C-alpha cells in the first residue's frame, strides 16, 4: 500500500504551469456542452450515460498539443475537469425532470419553467462540487493507495501518456464523424429505418428487433460482454417469455391498464401496456437492493468521512498542490444556492424542503465521493439514492398535505437536485484524484468544476426543452426510462392509479435475480427497455469480448486495442448524440406550408427508402468500422 507522504506527483508542487487559461476554459466549456448534450440524448434513449473524462482528455491533448502546439498537462487536465462535468449534470437532470414534462402532457396541473430547470441543474451541480471539496484531503490525499478511484487514475494515465494524445484524439473524432454521418442518413434523410422489428406469428406475443444506431454499439463495447449479456437476458425474459405468456393465458381478457383485449394488441402495445410496469418494478427493486447492500459501507464511510474532517490537519499549507477553495467562499456559495432555490417560485422549494436538500445532499455527496473511490463511478448506486430520496420526500409531502400535481412536482425537483449532487460529487472526486496524481492545483480544478457545472446546466435547459418540443419524453424516440421510473415511483406513493400487481411481479423478479447472485440492475434495465436496444448493445459487447480474448504480443498491446475501442465508441456516442440534437432543431423549425426542415430532408417522402436490408447493411459496415479502428495496427497480434 502506497504511503501518501512518499507520493510525488508527475508535476512537482514547486513547478508552475498554465492551468486556467482562455484556451482551457473555452475548450472545456465546449466539451461540457457537447458531452452533456450527447449524454442527455443517450440517457433519454437507453437510460444510461457514459463517462466523458477520458474522451475529453484526449480531445484536449489533440487540440492543445497538435493544433495549438502548446505543451501543458495541467491545462489539459483543466479541460477534462470542466468537460466531464457535463455528463454528470446531464445524468441527474434527464433521470428525473422529464417526469414533469410527461405529467404536463398527460394533463396534470403542473408547470415547469425554463428558469426552474436551469436553477435546479446549476444549484444541484454547485452543491455537489462544494459538498465534496472539504473531503478532498481526507479521501484523495490521506487515502491515496487505499481508495483507487479507477476512472480518475485511468484518466491520469492517459494524460501522462500524452505523447500519444494526437492519435487517440483522432480515434475519438473518427468515431464522432462516422456516427454523425450515420445518424443523419438514418434519422435525418431517413434513407433506411433506424429500427427494425420482427414478430413471430407462430409464437404469439413474442418479437425481436434492433435499433441500428451507433451509440448503442458504442455503449455495448464500453460496457463489455458481461453487462451487455445481462441486459440481453432481461430483454429475452420480457419479449420471449413474459409477453407470450400474457397472450397465451389472457388473450380474451382486457386487463388494466390496457382498454382492449390482449389478443387485439400488437407486440409493441403488449410491451407498453404491461412490460414497462413490470420492468419499472424490477428497476426500482434493483436500485433499492443495491442501496441496501451498500448500507453498511454507506454508514461506515459517512462516519469515517466526518471523523476525518474533525481530525484533519488545520495547519495551512503553502504548497500549490494543497490549495483548495477557501471554506468561507464554499459556505457563501452554498448559502447562495439555497437562497436561489427558495427564491425562484417555479422551483416550488421552500425553507423546509431546502433543509431536506441539505440533509440528503450532504449525506449522499459524502457517500458518493468515497464509494466511487472504491467501486468506480459506473457502480455508484445513484439511481437507488434518487429512488430512496423520492420515496421519503413524497411520503413527507403527503403526510403534510402537499399532494396532487404540486406535491409530485416538488418531489421531482428535490430528487433532481439530490441526483445531480450525488452524480457530480462522484465526478469531482475522480477529477481531483486525476489532479492529485499529475500535480494540478486543487483550487483551479474546483473552479473548473464550477465553470463546467454552470455551462452544462445552462445547456441542459435548452437541450431538454428542445428534445421535448421535437419528440416528447416517454415516446418511441425518447423513452426516458429512468425518468418514467421516477414518475411511477412518485405517482405510486402519492396514491396514483398504478397497476401494482404488475409492479410487484417486477419486484419479485428482481428478488429472484438477486438470489441467483446475478447483478440485478442490468437485467432489470434490459427487462424495462425494448429489446431493440439490448440487441445492438449485445453486439458491441460481443466485439469487446472477441478483442479481449485475442492473442496479443503483450499486455501493453492488448491495452492499446481496448483503449482504442473505448475512445472510438465514445466518439460514436458523442456523434449520434450531437446529430440527435441537430435533428431535434430541424423538427421544430418551420419552413412554411406546415413543413419543418425535418420534413424537407426526409427522403421517404420522395419514395426513397432502402428498408430493413439497407439498415442491416449499414449497421454491418458500422460494426466493421469499430473492429477496424481497434485492430488498426496488425503487428500487435501473434
Image (tube, grey):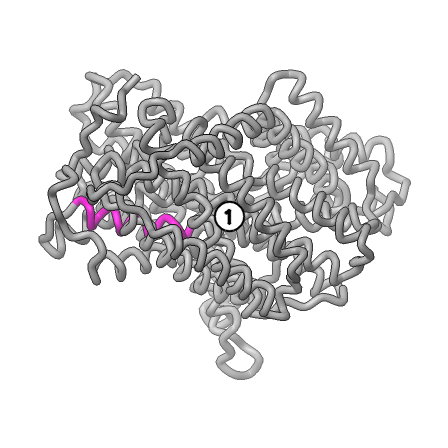
In this view, the residue in front, 494 or 283, is: 494
- Viewport quadrant of the N terminus: top left
Residue 222 higher or lower than 42, as above or below? above
Would you say 536 lies left or right of 402 here?
left
Q: Is residue 355 visible?
A: yes
Q: Identify the magenta region.
A: 73-86
The structure residue drawn at horizontal position 31% and vertical position 44%, both measured from the top left corner, is 55
In this view, the residue in front, 549 or 405, is: 405
In this view, the residue in front, 88 or 181, is: 88
Q: Residues within 10 Å of mark 1 (few under 14, many from 20)?
A: many
Q: Could you say where residue 425 lies in the image, as x and y percent from the top left? A: 45, 44
- Viewport quadrant of the C terminus: top left
Q: Could you say where residue 174 lies in the image, as x and y percent from the top left? A: 27, 47
The structure residue drawn at horizontal position 38% and vertical position 58%, both measured from the top left corner, is 33
**What residue is shown with label 1?**
421
Would you say 16 lies left or right of 474 here?
left
- Could you tell me what secondary structure mostly forms the magenta stretch? helix
Residue 592 higher or lower than 75, as above or below? below
295 within the magenta span: no
Q: Could you say where residue 377 lies in the image, as x and y percent from the top left? A: 44, 35
The structure residue drawn at horizontal position 66% and vertical position 55%, both measured from the top left corner, is 353
Amino acid at each position: 500500500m502506497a504511503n501518501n507522504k512518499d507520493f510525488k506527483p508527475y508535476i512537482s508542487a514547486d513547478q508552475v504551469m498554465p492551468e486556467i487559461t482562455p484556451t482551457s476554459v473555452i475548450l472545456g466549456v465546449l466539451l461540457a456542452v457537447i458531452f452533456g448534450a450527447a449524454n442527455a440524448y443517450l440517457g433519454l434513449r437507453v437510460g444510461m450515460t457514459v463517462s466523458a473524462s477520458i474522451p475529453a482528455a484526449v480531445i484536449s491533448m489533440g487540440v492543445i498539443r497538435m493544433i495549438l502546439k502548446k505543451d501543458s498537462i495541467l491545462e489539459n487536465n483543466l479541460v477534462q475537469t470542466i468537460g466531464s462535468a457535463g455528463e454528470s449534470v446531464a445524468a441527474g437532470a434527464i433521470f428525473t425532470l422529464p417526469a414533469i414534462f410527461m405529467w404536463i402532457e398527460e394533463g396534470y396541473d403542473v408547470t415547469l419553467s425554463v428558469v426552474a430547470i436551469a436553477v435546479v441543474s446549476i444549484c444541484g451541480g454547485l452543491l455537489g462540487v462544494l459538498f465534496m471539496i472539504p473531503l478532498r484531503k481526507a479521501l484523495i490525499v490521506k487515502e491515496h493507495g487505499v481508495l483507487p478511484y479507477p476512472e480518475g487514475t485511468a484518466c491520469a494515465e492517459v494524460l501522462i501518456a500524452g505523447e500519444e494524445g494526437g492519435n487517440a484524439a483522432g480515434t475519438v473524432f473518427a468515431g464522432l464523424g462516422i456516427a454523425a454521418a450515420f445518424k443523419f442518413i438514418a434519422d435525418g434523410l431517413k434513407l433506411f429505418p433506424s429500427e427494425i422489428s420482427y414478430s413471430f406469428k407462430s409464437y404469439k406475443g413474442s418479437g425481436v428487433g434492433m435499433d441500428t444506431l451507433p451509440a448503442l454499439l458504442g455503449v455495448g463495447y464500453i460496457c463489455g460482454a458481461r453487462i451487455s449479456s445481462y441486459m440481453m437476458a432481461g430483454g429475452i425474459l420480457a419479449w420471449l417469455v413474459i409477453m407470450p405468456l400474457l397472450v397465451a393465458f389472457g388473450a380474451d381478457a382486457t386487463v388494466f391498464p390496457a382498454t382492449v383485449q390482449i389478443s387485439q394488441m400488437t407486440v409493441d402495445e403488449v410491451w407498453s401496456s404491461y412490460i414497462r410496469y413490470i420492468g419499472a418494478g424490477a428497476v426500482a427493486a434493483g436500485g433499492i437492493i443495491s442501496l441496501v447492500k451498500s448500507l453498511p459501507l454507506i454508514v461506515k464511510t459517512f462516519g469515517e468521512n466526518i471523523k476525518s474532517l474533525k481530525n484533519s490537519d488545520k495547519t495551512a499549507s503553502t504548497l500549490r498542490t494543497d490549495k483548495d477553495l477557501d471554506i468561507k467562499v464554499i459556505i457563501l456559495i452554498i448559502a447562495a444556492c439555497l437562497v436561489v432555490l427558495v427564491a425562484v417560485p417555479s422551483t416550488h422549494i421552500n425553507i423546509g424542503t431546502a433543509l431536506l436538500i441539505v440533509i440528503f445532499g450532504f449525506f449522499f455527496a459524502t457517500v458518493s465521493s468515497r464509494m466511487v473511490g472504491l467501486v468506480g463511478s459506473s457502480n455508484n448506486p445513484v439511481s437507488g439514492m434518487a429512488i430512496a430520496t423520492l420515496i421519503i420526500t413524497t411520503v413527507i409531502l403527503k403526510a403534510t398535505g402537499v399532494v396532487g400535481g404540486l406535491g409530485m412536482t416538488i418531489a421531482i425537483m428535490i430528487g433532481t437536485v439530490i441526483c445531480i449532487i450525488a452524480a457530480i460529487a462522484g465526478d469531482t472526486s475522480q477529477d481531483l484524484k486525476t489532479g492529485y496524481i499529475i500535480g494540478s492545483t486543487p483550487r483551479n480544478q474546483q473552479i473548473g468544476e464550477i465553470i463546467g457545472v454552470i455551462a452544462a446546466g445552462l445547456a441542459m435547459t435548452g437541450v431538454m426543452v428542445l428534445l421535448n418540443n421535437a419528440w416528447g419524453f416517454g415516446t418511441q424516440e425518447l423513452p426516458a426510462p429512468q425518468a418514467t421510473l421516477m414518475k411511477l415511483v412518485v405517482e405510486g406513493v402519492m396514491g396514483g392509479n398504478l397497476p401494482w400487481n404488475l409492479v410487484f411481479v417486477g419486484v419479485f423478479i428482481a428478488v429472484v435475480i438477486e438470489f441467483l447472485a446475478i447483478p440485478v440492475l442490468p437485467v432489470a434495465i434490459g427487462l424495462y427497455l425494448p429489446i431493440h436496444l439490448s440487441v445492438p448493445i449485445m453486439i458491441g459487447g460481443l466485439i469487446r469480448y472477441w478483442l479481449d480474448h485475442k492473442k496479443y504480443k503483450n499486455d501493453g498491446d492488448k491495452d492499446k486495442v481496448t483503449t482504442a475501442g473505448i475512445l472510438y465508441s465514445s466518439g460514436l456516442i458523442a456523434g449520434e448524440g450531437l446529430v440527435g440534437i441537430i435533428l431535434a432543431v430541424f423538427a421544430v423549425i418551420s419552413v412554411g406550408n406546415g413543413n419543418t426542415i425535418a420534413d424537407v430532408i426526409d427522403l421517404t417522402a420522395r419514395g426513397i427508402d432502402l428498408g430493413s436490408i439497407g439498415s442491416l447493411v449499414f449497421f454491418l459496415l458500422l460494426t466493421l468500422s469499430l473492429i477496424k479502428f481497434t485492430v488498426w495496427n496488425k503487428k500487435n497480434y501473434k
